[in-house]
Amino acid sequence: NGSNVNIEFDPSLLVTDLVFFFYSHSVRCGYSTAIQCTNICGNVLNCGKHNCTQKCHSGNCLSCELTVKQVCYCGRASREVLCGTSKDWFACLRTCGKKLSCGMHSCEQVCHPEACQPCPRLPQIVHCCPCGQTSLSKLLELGCMERKLCTDPIPSCGRTCGKPLPCSSYDAVHTCENLCHEGECGQCSRTSKVYCRCALKLKEVPCASLKNQVKVPFLCDKRCNKKLSCGRHKCNETCCVDKEHKCSLICGRKLNCGIHRCEEPCHRGNCQKCWQTSFEELTCYCGGSVIYPPVPCGTRPPECKNSCTRPHECDHPVYHSCHSEEKCPPCTYLVQKWCMGRHELRSNIPCYLTDISCGLSCDRMLKCGMHKCKRICHKGECLIDEECRQPCTILRLHCNHPCMSPCHPSLPCPTTPCRSKVGGCDNSLPFKQAQM
């Protein structure tokens, strides 16, 4: 029952021969059969031309990494490619240029793999005049010479060519006005109406300037006012046809660290956080607390419980802790200070307060030398750019009542009627009326 089994035969002690590509090796039965030798693999690679140069390995061989030179079909261009990644030939998109079977003309097709077509000017291929309106058999009846070779001229019918010109794709079909001829048609002498790039404005231009022209002939002066993808800038492009309106400027806004600026293309929404990192220790002002590198940009200095060691304007005890701000909190130590008008010495005033009012009237003599300031205890001069406007208290010569005109320190009192009232009842009259 498990513990009393007599092992008379151990199959793991058998030895078997494992035969590989180049040699055999004896291993214990049940061992892994993934055995590698030190010989070169030598298997044919995916290109079918070269062999694997790696040492004996498991799995498929790597793709061939050798470069080979490929020549185009017409033989006028070549390129370097990885062996086995493409066909042995390619089309260079140039005119073939090979001599045709006639031996006189060249192939005008784009670089191609198959054999060149027969010469298109052979007598057995050409059956009509160059403009295509009249057959050669009819022209032979009219006395034209029969063509024997591809180099013989193709008879002309004498009619107007009438082939559509390249400018026909714009606003109307223009045709060749020359007589039936070989070769390409001449330039069109007419004009065509063409639209600008954004199709807003129409312009009439000579057809000769449109021949084989790929770009739009002109741009209008309308500026695009659409906002770009960032939502911050406008396009401002003239004759714009852009649909996406992507902003190509750099964002440039300050990042969360307050030091570096966003270097991403201008975008919507918030910028990413600053990824700059410092590898210097970041300490508090007194050096009692330290943050060891790496320190992400924008990290505030560590908090410190030590007392502030910065220089202060006063000699009072410091009650605030070490801080990273350059300016210390105001000193709140209670002291005695004079009010602004120096009327009384006030107690229990925080040290940082400088302008203290006692609430009493200023009572300082004004520049006029006659009146005193009636403002509540204040800072600075009583009257800076103003003149005293209090009533003049100089007694009049005729009635001994005060002048009551606005203060005039350098001028005599004006000779105005006295407005002081006499009598003790409610029906009192001005002094001048009472004398009459």
Image (spheres, grey):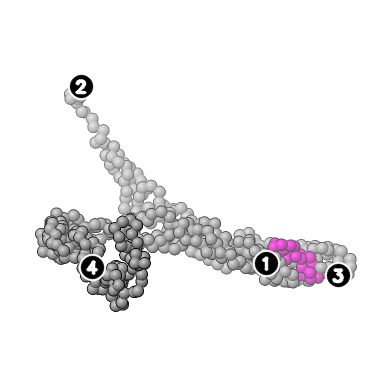
Q: Secondary structure at mark 1?
A: strand
The dot on residue 144 is 3
Secondary structure beneath dot 3 equals loop
Q: Which residue is painted at 25% across and 57% down in the image?
A: 299
Q: Which residue is drawn at the image coordinates 82% and 63% (left, top)?
A: 133
**Label 4 vs 1, first from the N-terminus:** 1
- Disc on the earlier residue, 1 or 3: 3
Q: Which residue is mark 2?
A: 1
Disc 2 residue type? Asn
Q: Main secondary structure of the magenta part?
A: loop
Please give the label number shown on residue 228: none
Residue marked by disc 1:
203
Which mark is first along the chain, 2 or 3?
2
Magenta stretch holds residue 356? no
Mark 4 surroundings: few (<14), some (14-19) or many (≥20) residues within 10 A: some
What segment is highlighted magenta in the picture? 161-183
Q: Earlier in the sequence, mark 2 or mark 4?
A: 2
Q: State whether residue 336 appears in this view.
A: yes
- Mark 2, Cα crowd under 10 Å, few <14 / some 14-19 / many 20+, is few
User: In the picture, which quadrant includes the N terminus?
Assistant: top left
Quadrant of res 111: bottom right
Residue tagged by mark 4? 372
Q: Nearer the viewer, mark 4 or mark 1?
A: 4
CA gap, disc 2 to disc 1? 105 Å
* Proximity of marks 4 and 1: CB atoms separated by less than 8 Å: no
Q: Secondary structure at mark 2?
A: loop
Depth-wise, is mark 2 or mark 1 nearer the camera?
Answer: 1
